Image (tube, rainbow, N blue to C red):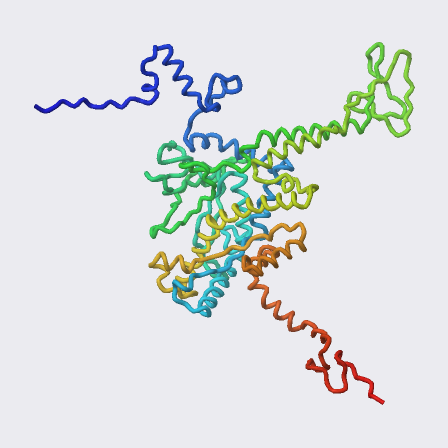
């Protein structure tokens, strides 16, 4: 006889924990077990009315993007703090443009040092010729340094931006490659289509979540234009070409898995920034009113006064002129409007708010307001924290914009025969070996150049840093580009010969006969 085996039923942990209790006791125990995290409790006064919805990355973001972009751009245009914060990040991340230094893997490619240097110099020369010309811009307006600034700034203000590879040969251009920068609002779901699992706000994805194509609107959805635009159309722009190479770059920071569009840099602090801007405007107006020293004349009849000698009419009363004397009638009295401005509490309160805003923006207070009043060590710590943030953003820009564009440049240069790179088009590892790069950005902020120079000298002596790294950090220029000028200056201004030390003769040797130990002639003996 085959024994009967009863199937095991999986009982949830909470059900097992409440076994043996009455219904009321089990309910109370479950509620207790559900509140081990205080942040998840619903029976506390501070949390009972806080019930945010659980949504996907796109669900929590897409519906708010249009409003977030408009408000972010308005703050950058009109709020000094917001505009300054974005400008600070762009200046310290991009500066005058990230400059290329080719670093191919010569060991893997089997090249000598001389061959590698020659190939790198040729690649850098082709890239500079393309990048330093406005031919790289589809609108013939900016060089690649300007496009870096534009693309990064647009990402901060709007949340994302698109860079499309175009081929448009022009007279005088070394390559046919041109870049088209498309603002975030122009990529949207076409009329007649609906967002769904495979189409998210103009981004079409496959079953794995990888982009397939982007739907680009023919014109910007302008709400302020004073003319009637044509009926918009949408063009599908592929994300990848037939060979699998990227042809459209979507620049945005993915903060959650599955997110397909980016939110503006200022999104978490839009409300406090706007409120702070309004508060500052109100304080300025109150100070202006206080400076006018406005008075109000009260009459028994409540009727308005005629012209007062020496007073200038002002809204709601009279603004006193210099040395003005007013003659009041019977029963009339003067009441002075005193707004109590300037407000002594204004600056401490604003600084407290700015510190919280700086935390959200990853900008220390000193960097955010460009004001260093603390000790050297505290200011140095703020600069180091900011540098870590700028370096992170710079690495993101290099990976998502500069490296792909450089690959486009080198690929076309090889196809045109400007460069010889066997295996580049066939082997991904060989291609990666040829495409090694370092991008040099703005120099590091220095508070005390002498102290930091001594620290760099010690690190160079310990073989922890190279002279090239120090040169890039302190000047923003690669040492290789400085060496020709350094050699030229050393030839023009050779270092002075060292003075002879004690005990050395006139020709640098031991003392000669007739000279003392210092090399001076001795007096003859009588």
383 or 216: which is nearer to us? 383
58 or 479: which is nearer to us? 479
In the image, residue 199 above or below residue 238: above
- Residue in the image at 32% along x and 19% along y: 15
In the image, residue 118 above or below residue 453: below
Q: Quadrant of the C terminus?
A: bottom right
Residue 18, given in percent of the width and then of the height, sits at 34, 16
Q: Quadrant of the N terminus?
A: top left
Asked whether residue 151 is in view, the answer is no
Left or right placement of residue 209 versus residue 468 in this view? left
46 or 353: which is nearer to us? 46
- Residue in the image at 77% along x and 25% along y: 340
Left or right placement of residue 37 versus residue 480 in this view? left
- Residue in the image at 44% along x and 23% along y: 36
Left or right placement of residue 306 versus residue 451 in this view? right
In the image, residue 68 above or below residue 422: above
Residue 127, given in percent of the width and then of the height, sits at 49, 60
143 or 262: which is nearer to us? 262
Asked whether residue 205 is in view, the answer is yes
């Amino acid at each position: 006889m085959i024994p009967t085996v009863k199937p095991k039923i999986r009982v949830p942990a909470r059900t097992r924990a409440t076994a043996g209790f009455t219904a009321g006791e089990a309910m109370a125990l479950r509620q207790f077990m559900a509140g081990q995290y205080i942040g998840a409790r619903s029976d506390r006064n501070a949390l009972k009315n806080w019930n945010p919805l659980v949504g996907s990355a796109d669900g929590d973001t897409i519906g708010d993007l249009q409003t977030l972009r408009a408000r972010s751009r308005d703050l950058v245009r009109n709020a000094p703090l917001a505009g300054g914060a974005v400008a600070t990040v762009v200046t310290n991340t991009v500066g005058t443009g990230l400059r290329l230094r080719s670093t191919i893997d010569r060991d893997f490619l089997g090249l000598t040092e001389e061959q590698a240097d020659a190939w790198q110099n040729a690649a850098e020369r082709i890239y500079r010729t393309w990048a330093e010309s406005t031919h790289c811009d589809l609108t013939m307006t900016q060089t690649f340094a300007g496009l870096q600034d534009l693309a990064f700034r647009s990402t901060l203000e709007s949340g994302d931006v698109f860079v499309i590879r175009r081929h448009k040969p022009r007279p005088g251009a070394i390559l046919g490659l041109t870049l088209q920068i498309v603002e975030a609002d122009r990529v949207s779901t076409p009329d007649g289509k609906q967002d769904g699992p495979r189409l998210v706000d103009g981004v079409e994805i496959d079953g794995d979540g990888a982009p397939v194509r982007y739907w680009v609107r023919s014109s910007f959805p302008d709400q302020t234009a004073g003319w009637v635009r044509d009926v918009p159309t949408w063009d599908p722009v592929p994300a990848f070409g037939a060979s699998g190479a990227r042809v459209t770059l979507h620049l945005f920071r993915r903060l959650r898995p599955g997110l397909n569009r980016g939110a503006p840099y200022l999104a978490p602090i839009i409300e406090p920034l706007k409120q702070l801007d309004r508060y500052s405007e109100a304080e300025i107006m109150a100070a202006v009113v206080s400076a006018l020293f406005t008075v109000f004349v009260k009459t028994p009849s409540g009727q308005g006064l005629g012209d007062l000698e020496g007073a200038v009419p002002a809204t709601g009363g009279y603004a006193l002129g210099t040395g003005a004397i007013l003659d009041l009638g019977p029963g009339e009295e003067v009441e002075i409007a005193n707004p109590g401005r300037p407000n002594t509490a204004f600056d401490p309160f604003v600084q407290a708010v700015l510190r919280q805003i700086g935390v959200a923006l990853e900008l220390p207070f000193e960097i955010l307001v460009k004001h260093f009043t603390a000790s050297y060590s505290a200011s140095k710590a703020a600069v180091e924290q900011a540098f870590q943030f700028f370096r992170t953003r710079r690495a993101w820009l290099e990976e998502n914009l500069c490296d792909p564009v450089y690959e486009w440049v080198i690929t076309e240069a090889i196809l045109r025969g400007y460069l010889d790179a066997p295996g580049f088009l066939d082997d991904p590892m060989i291609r990666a070996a040829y495409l090694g790069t370092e991008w040099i950005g703005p120099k590091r902020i220095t508070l005390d150049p002498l102290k930091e120079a001594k620290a760099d000298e010690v690190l160079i002596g310990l073989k922890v840093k190279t002279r090239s790294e120090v040169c890039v950090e302190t000047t923003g220029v690669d040492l290789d580009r400085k060496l020709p000028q350094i050699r030229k200056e050393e030839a023009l201004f050779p270092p002075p010969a060292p003075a002879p030390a004690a005990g050395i003769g006139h020709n640098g040797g031991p003392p000669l006969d007739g000279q003392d130990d210092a090399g001076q002639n001795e007096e003859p003996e009588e």
